Amino acid sequence: FPEMSHLPCLCWGAGAGQDVGRSCILVSIAGKNVMLDCGMHMGYNDDRRFPDFSYITQNGRLTDFLDCVIISHFHLDHCGALPYFSEMVGYDGPIYMTHPTKAICPILLEDYRKITVDKKGETNFFTSQMIKDCMKKVVAVHLHQTVQVDEELEIKAYYAGHVLGAAMFQIKVGCESVVYTGDYNMTPDRHLGAAWIDKCRPDLLITESTYATTIRDSKRCRERDFLKKVHETVERGGKVLIPVFALGRAQELCILLETFWERMNLKAPIYFSTGLTEKANHYYKLFITWTNQKIRKTFVQRNMFEFKHIKAFDRAFADNPGPMVVFATPGMLHAGQSLQIFRKWAGNEKNMVIMPGYCVQGTVGHKILSGQRKLEMEGRQILEVKMQVEYMSFSAHADAKGIMQLIRQAEPRNVLLVHGEAKKMEFLKQKIEQELNVSCYMPANGETTTIFTNPSIPVDISLGLLKRETAIGPLPDAKKPKLMHGTLIMKDNSFRLVSPEQALKELGLAEHQLRFTCRVHIQDPRKEHETVLRVYNHLKGQVVLKDYSVQHLPDGSITVESILIQATAHSEDQGTKVLLVSWTYQDEELGSYLTALLKKGLPPSTS
Amino acid sequence: FQYCLSGHPTLPCNVLKFKSTTIMLDCGLDMTSTLNFLPMPLVQSPRLSKLPGWVLKDGSTFLDKELKECSGHVFVDSVPEFCLPETELLDLSTVDVILISNYHCMMALPYITEYTGFTGTVYATEPTVQIGRLLMEELVNSIERVPKAQSASMWKNKEVQRLLPAPLKDAVEVSMWRKCYTMPEVNAALSKIQLVGYSQKIELFGAVQVTPLSSGYALGSSNWIIQSHYEKVSYVSGSSLLTTHPQPMDQASLKNSDVLILTGLTQIPTANPDGMVGEFCSNLAMTVRNGGNVLVPCYPSGVIYDLLECLYQYIDSAGLSNVPFYFISPVANSSLEFSQIFAEWLCHNKQTKVYLPEPPFPHAELIQTNKLKHYPSIHGDFSNDFKQPCVVFTGHPSLRFGDVVHFMELWGKSSLNTVIFTEPDFSYLDALAPYQPLAMKCVYCPIDTRLNFIQVSKLLKEVQPLHVVCPEQYTQPPPTQSHRTDLMVDCQPPPMSYRRAEVLTLPYKRRYEKIEIMPELADSLVPLEIKPGISLATVSAVLHTKDNKHVLQLPPKPPQPPTSKKRKRVSDDVPECKPLKPLLSGSIPVDQFVQTLEKHGFSDVKVEDTAKGHIVLLQEAETLIQIEEDSTHIICDNDEPLRVKLRDLVLKFLQKF
């Protein structure tokens, strides 16, 4: 006691480290182990898809090792490995997520499972039942609710704005705390509000850094740009494919196109693929309290998620002649309907594909965005891409400015960057260290970062002691720091600070009084009581003692605070008087000061 | 201290002074005062407009403009007024925060936040605020819709009031009665609210933490924990253990309270809500089957959701599929819409529905299938769609204002029709008084899901508070059932009771406070194991207190070794910055002490025994050391080095505290 403690933070598995792919972070804080997110990598179709959980514990059950798992939002790169983790590897402890995440996450997992197992015929994958069993382990949390995981560990969710139900989490044990942002967005958009956190001063802030270097131009410009491109393509009779994830960006872009179509009185059809659409919009309606202020305020009059111009897509529509706009899932063109439509339309230069979000390496989306125009598809078939490829950053991640803003809000002691690309993260790390003077880390995959904290120790102080110390003292000067003296009793794991008297009493011990009496010889032929009076006047005249109580008692003695001074005649020498100065150990300074003072003799009497 | 500002146990308004913060608990508005006023008809009512003025026994008529005789009672002919919470008991501008427990208990908020100099913050959950806003909107709307030129005040004069017949004669605090607030005032009041979630810990000035907990009574309804590190006050207001639509009550978090303030119990302790719902349905069905209409005076949110859900399950089996249900309120649409978006505040079953995703309340389906229609008022679309026989849900339950007044006038004359009272806030006989004589049937099925006394005693056994504080009404049986000693709060020690305008000292005693020891100071401490498992360390530190948080830091380093010139001044300063010396404990074994003295060069040590101990003499140094069980006294010449040396040798044998 006390001990320097440390927060090892392990980011592993090609994910949460320096790559945007899948998130899975292990944090140990004051002896508690918490896993943050449990994502899968969309770019892989093999074992590398899921994090390697043997990183956590080589032997022994995950349930014994982990105190809890926290999921920040429903995107598969943050929760896609959850059923694998809980049902196939085996974890029975609590999993925390917000209500919308709990509602939507199983649907996306099932959707993803269908694509992988039913369409691609993969085995060794989680089943529908496993998704259901996994969700039974989920505990839903409210925003700002303090959830007591156990007696010491508490977590609290903050609004993150990235998608419906996205949250940042504070993990706290005693005085130590970590904040994990998940993905977040610092600017409100058409359907979500901005991320917000209070000045919680965590020891460590783990933040995503997807757009670490980008300072994106204004939202309005990007929207205008997007509408212009869609409009131009439709005008010249082309088809626009917008690969999206069913929930999230899709709703924002739908709102955008819906209002634009209304304003411009456009006729070209807009479709939204998969049966998820209506369901998805329903989630937005029922969880409207998680959207932005404007939508929440007006929802009774007009529900923004009831679209007039946007209709359900049928596979056959893809071959229809004439212009159209299609939102199709999934967002990175790695499988499913969006990929099918892409293959159909890629050969025509009149058409356009707009990628509104980030694509991980290995996906078709990533390939075409990096300029590749000849794609090798399944069966060695080569697909030539003639359609226009546009990238528009609509994903609701914080940009560099936003990340800096969040760090300023939370005031962490250390920052750890994850979920980004190494080069960009390096730039941001320097910026954070220089501008905010906060140490910043960017661990590689599988690397453990250890952060040292030096927490202060909370103890219980007896009110009597605290009141005594704040109320009295020789100089009640508010500006002067007050010196406090007490005894810290350490018993089991409790620390109590009490007055020394109380400590003695509690332990059943008696006080041992140590007293000193010094003889000071003074040349003074006068009567004893006259000597005493001279001593009294001398002490009274001392500037140094002006704040002390100096008293001349009727029995002929003098007290200065608790120090007692008496005079007796010297047994042999009548011209000498002996002053007996007596004090206790607790008043030693004053006692020894007074003897030294008196030893110098008395000033010549003025009378 | 607790200041009681409202005498109404289910519409409380208390102020708690806790650790230098002033916290108002709820802001209830007593609306029973409106029963003394004439109803406000939406359509000119020949009956109500031709009432005779009231004449005093001595024939004087000076009150005939203000008071009207109607159905054998005397009513005030004026804009209805409400009884405000006490505003004189303490300066309400000193209130730091207001905690709201549910939307029924915030109706006086505009009076407090807009007229008392209040500058603090109000805390409430999101459903509480949204539905509370709807209730206020409906109230303001129903009163402002019927412009009444006059507002009566003469009758309130104490001398005049004495002469009036009951119940006006006995009406209390009439000088505190006020007209309804306006929408701008409602908006201003609501803008002072900060939204909170269940189990959110809110710090007040670093000294106090408040936390709302689910109370199970209504959407977003909360009980509150008010605590410092060492004392805990639970404020239980309007709680329910029945499974209706809201999230269940959080009982566990109420444990270990020093004080539990208990308000908002059921107003109808003898009625079983489930039984009442059954009676409601059967009376409704019977009336409709006989070709009559059913009027349900109600609030626009709350129990109506449960009633609609029951009817949803009931109508087909009861053959009522073709009977239209109308919900008429300026906020009917909003209330129905809002009820569907608070998934997180609902009971488990309803939450599961949202996950599907389906609307949590089946009234969505009733609306979709046109079985339930809602209208902002009886004017407009409603008059075209209106078909009889039908069921109408509308406000206000006092029957003094709102669309309900119209239906009472319209349907009161026919014995085919039925009015069913479900809201427990008003005596139904008093509510009906100005409409008498009535041909229409009146059924009283009060549905109050709040705790009854059996549930209270179970709850108190469960959470074991040290003290219970409650309104005086709960400490005795109801006046009309004085033999029912089971209808009161029964606990040990007996509850402390309060009444309107009373100040109560709450019985909690603090012993400890939290303080933080900075790491540098912690490093410098030297713990000593005194007994097995118990270690002590003496702490001398500087105390810093800011925002009610206490921190202990290392004392400043002693001044640098002074230069010769400054030496004198430093020695002058000695007494001023004296560090406190620890207390000592233990005893000195004389033999070992003498040995130690000898080891340190004292060769002429002599020991004498005394009655209580020993005297050790150092002859050459003319020094005497008296050693007893619990004390040591060193008497020497003024030889500081000698004294210090002896002191250190003594201290070796003692423990410091």
Image: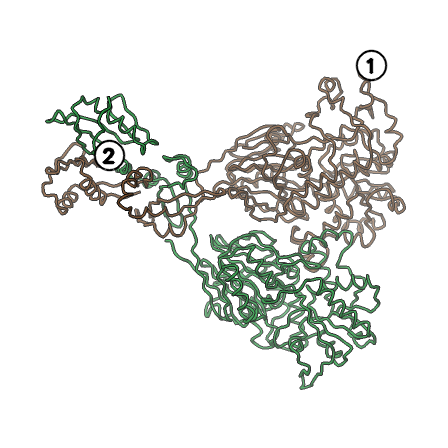
Chain colours: A green, B brown
Identify the image quadrant of residue A499. Answer: top left
Q: Is residue B162 left or right of residue A205?
A: right
Tell me, yes or no, if residue B325 can be seen here.
yes
Q: Which element is circle 2 on?
A: helix
Q: In the image, what residue type sits under mark 2?
A: Leu
Q: Residue furthest top?
A: B58
x 60%, y 55%: residue: A196
Quadrant of the rendered image containing residue B414: top right
Q: Position of residue B496 (x, y in %)?
A: 55, 31
Residue B197 image offset from top left, x and y in percent: 61, 49
| Label 1 Cα crowd, 10 Å radius (few <14 / some 14-19 / many 20+) | few
Res A377 visible? no
Amino acid type, residue under disc 1 in the picture: Gly
- Residues B501 and B267: in front is B501
> What subunit carries mark 2?
A
Q: Quadrant of the N terminus of chain B?
A: top right
Q: Quadrant of residue A603?
A: top left
Give the residue pinned by disc 1: B59
Q: Which residue is mark 2?
A: A597
Q: Which percent across, then down, holds residue A434?
A: 51, 62
